[in-house]
Image (cartoon, rainbow, N blue to C red):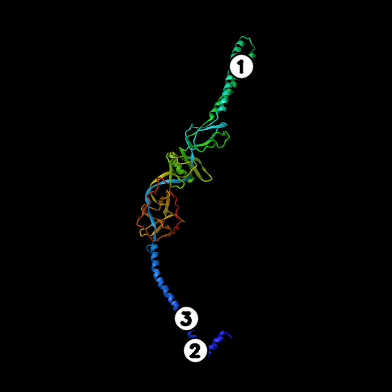
Amino acid sequence: MGSQQVIEDITKANPTAERQARRGRGARPVVIAALALVVAVAAAGLWGMLAPWGSQQQAKRDGPPHSVPVGVATADKADMPVMLEAIGTVTPLATVTVRTQINGHLTQVGFQEGQRVRKGDFLAEVDPRPYQAALEQAEGQLARDQALLRNAEVDLNRYRQLVAEDSIARQTLDTQDSLVRQYRGTIKVDQAQVNTAQLNLSYCRIVSPTDGRVGLRQVDQGNYVQTSDVNGIVVVTQLQPITVVFTIPEDNLQKVLARVRSGATLPVSAYDRAGTVLLATGTLATIDNQIDPTTGTVKLKALFDNLDERLFPNQFVNVRLLVDTVHDVPVIPAAAVQRGAQGTYVYTITADTTAASRLVTIGAGDGERVQVLSGITAGERVVVDGIDRLRDGSKVSVPAEVKSAGEPPPGPPGGPATHRPAQAGPQRPDR
């Protein structure tokens, strides 16, 4: 028998129990509904307390209703330098590996590593005794042959007189004449040997071939040095003056050539690897005679006095070449320039503080500022910060202080500009 049947039998037998069971089943929904009502009232009260606080925080973040906070700058007229930036390598005018020109023992080293030397200063000496002996031998041979020549010449003169008197045969005179010529040739050979011995003896004393700074010693005193040694004795590098070799795109070559052909002296500045510290200033020295077809660039060489030796051979530097300066032109911060599907544009601030995109044509720049060729006039305000939240017609909130774009970026005069690529930003919508 099922449990349901048992319950029905009990309730039929006991009417009081049946009434109690019916009251229990009717009270359960009422309790659940009461609990749901209490929870709803509590949630509504909590929301009422939190909603004003959240609205206040959102209002603080968003500023005035329906406006976008932006940073602006005013287009101004200023002088804009036309600069070309490149990466260069410091290249000395002379780098000489000092090698011995004769074989022998190194008997003396006359320099200190890192020492500054002048052309002709003593550097090292190879044992000169073998070469001094060779010179004396050659001089002795020469003296002997010279004596033989003088004797042969005396006999030649005597034979000529005898032949004139018809006292000796003509053949004897001719033989003596040939002997004199032979001795004269021998003396030339002897003299050449003397000159060679003198030259080798002079090679024993090794001197600096140029002004510069010596590097690390490659061989120590007492070693046997040979002309076949690859490393040599020491390397002398000229540091003053020094050059920097750098490349520019072939598209910029004509601007540089035009200035060079007009006789202008183009200033060049060299900065450290980070592009922040000015190392030296110099001038453009020369331009290579051909363009590299693999890279589409041409090499240029700049000359620096390098009096403080801040430029070091094979050092990588950032180079800035001042090609020209355009005067009194509209300039804006580079951060204001955006690029979209229709080209280069900026956001301007209208009189009713709304943002409006406008196509512009830009010219020369120094990394912080750019010249505006068309699209913007001096005095107009452009957005430089908060551009990613703007659309055409967006209401903006402009700070009280508006910076001007006419002043050059801070830092040393002619210092390198840090490249700031234009933000992608929203593309300018079609009008």
Q: Nearer the viewer, residue 320 or 348?
A: 320
User: Residue tagged by mark 3?
Assistant: 29
Between circles 2 and 3, the one closer to the viewer is 2
Q: Position of residue 356 (x, y in %)?
A: 40, 58
Q: Position of residue 54 (x, y in %)?
A: 40, 67
The amino acid sitting under disc 1 is Asp
User: Residue tagged by mark 2?
Assistant: 16
- Of helix, strand and loop, which one carries label 3? helix
Q: Nearer the viewer, residue 90 or 260?
A: 90
Q: Are marks 1 and 2 in contact (CB under 8 Å)?
A: no
The reply to whether residue 243 is visible in this rendering is yes
Crowding near the residue tagged with mark 1, few <14, some 14–19, many ≥20 C-alpha atoms within 10 Å: some
Crowding near the residue tagged with mark 3, few <14, some 14–19, many ≥20 C-alpha atoms within 10 Å: few
- Of helix, strand and loop, which one carries label 2? helix
Asked if residue 16 is positioned above or below residue 49 in the image, the reply reads: below
- Of helix, strand and loop, which one carries label 1? helix
- Point out the residue furthest to the front here: 222
Q: Are marks 2 and 3 in contact (CB under 8 Å)?
A: no
The amino acid sitting under disc 3 is Pro
Asked if residue 110 is positioned above or below residue 319 in the image, the reply reads: above
Q: Position of residue 395 (x, y in %)?
A: 38, 61
Q: CA distance from mark 1 to mark 2?
A: 173 Å
Q: Quadrant of residue 129?
A: top right
User: Residue tagged by mark 1?
Assistant: 177
Q: CA distance from mark 2 to mark 3?
A: 22 Å
Image quarter (top left, top right, bottom left or bottom right) of the N terminus? bottom right
Q: Is 269 placed left or right of 188 in the picture?
A: left
Q: Are marks 1 and 3 in contact (CB under 8 Å)?
A: no
Mark 2 or 3, nearer chain start? 2
